[in-house]
Image: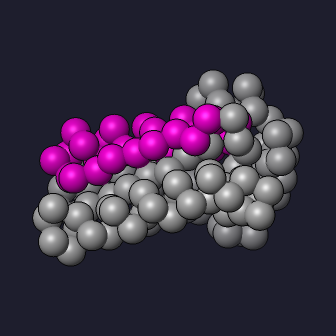
């Protein structure tokens, strides 16, 4: 996925993600298990899942994975939406909340609106 190359080393790098995945899945036996890595789920495995809201950051190596997962959910008939926070790195909207309060408050607001929608359908 392009974001793995475009955004490698912008606060998060692929080498570190590889090391962390070894902690998450030490034997590597679950590399394509959708319960471990949801992007590997087939459409029939996604049908009937609850609503999803996926937030990605423009300068995040994981950006394209999140967007691809959202597309798979929608194709499976799951209510799903996503947003991309432009100009920031992985989780910067939460990590740098004091330095970027507008971005942080936007994230909190989007999560709140999603939760309200799921609970009330509005």
Q: Is residue 66 visible?
A: yes
Report the residue at 75% width, 33% height from top.
Answer: 7
Could you tell me which residue is drawn at 50 percent across and 51 percent down? 55
Q: How did the renderer colour the structure?
A: one colour
Please, is residue 39 above or below residue 36 in the view?
above
Residue at 39%, 68% (x, y): give it: 112
Residue 83: % across, % down: 45, 43
Q: Within the magenta stretch, is there residue 13?
A: no
The foreground one among 79 and 75 is 79
Q: Position of residue 73 (x, y in %)?
A: 29, 47
| 22 left or right, relative to 28 | right
Direction bottom: furthest residue? 119
Left or right: 27 with respect to 65? right
In-front residue for pair 78/96: 96
**Dividing the image into 4 quarters, which one contains the C terminus?**
bottom left
The answer to which image quadrant residue 6 occupies is: top right
Spot occupied by residue 99 in the image (x, y as percentages of width and height): 79, 56
| Magenta stretch bounds | 58-86
Left or right side of 56 for 60:
right
């Amino acid at each position: 996925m392009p974001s793995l190359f475009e955004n490698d080393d912008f606060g998060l790098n692929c080498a570190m993600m590889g090391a962390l995945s070894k902690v998450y899945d030490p034997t590597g036996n679950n590399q394509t298990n959708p319960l471990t890595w949801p992007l590997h789920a087939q459409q029939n495995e996604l049908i009937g899942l609850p609503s999803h809201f996926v937030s990605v950051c423009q300068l995040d190596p994981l950006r394209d994975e999140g967007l691809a997962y959202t597309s798979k959910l929608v194709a499976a008939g799951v209510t799903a939406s996503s947003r991309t926070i432009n100009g920031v790195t992985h989780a910067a909207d939460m990590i740098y909340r004091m330095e970027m309060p507008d971005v942080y408050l936007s994230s909190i607001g989007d999560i709140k609106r999603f939760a309200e929608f799921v609970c009330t359908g509005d």
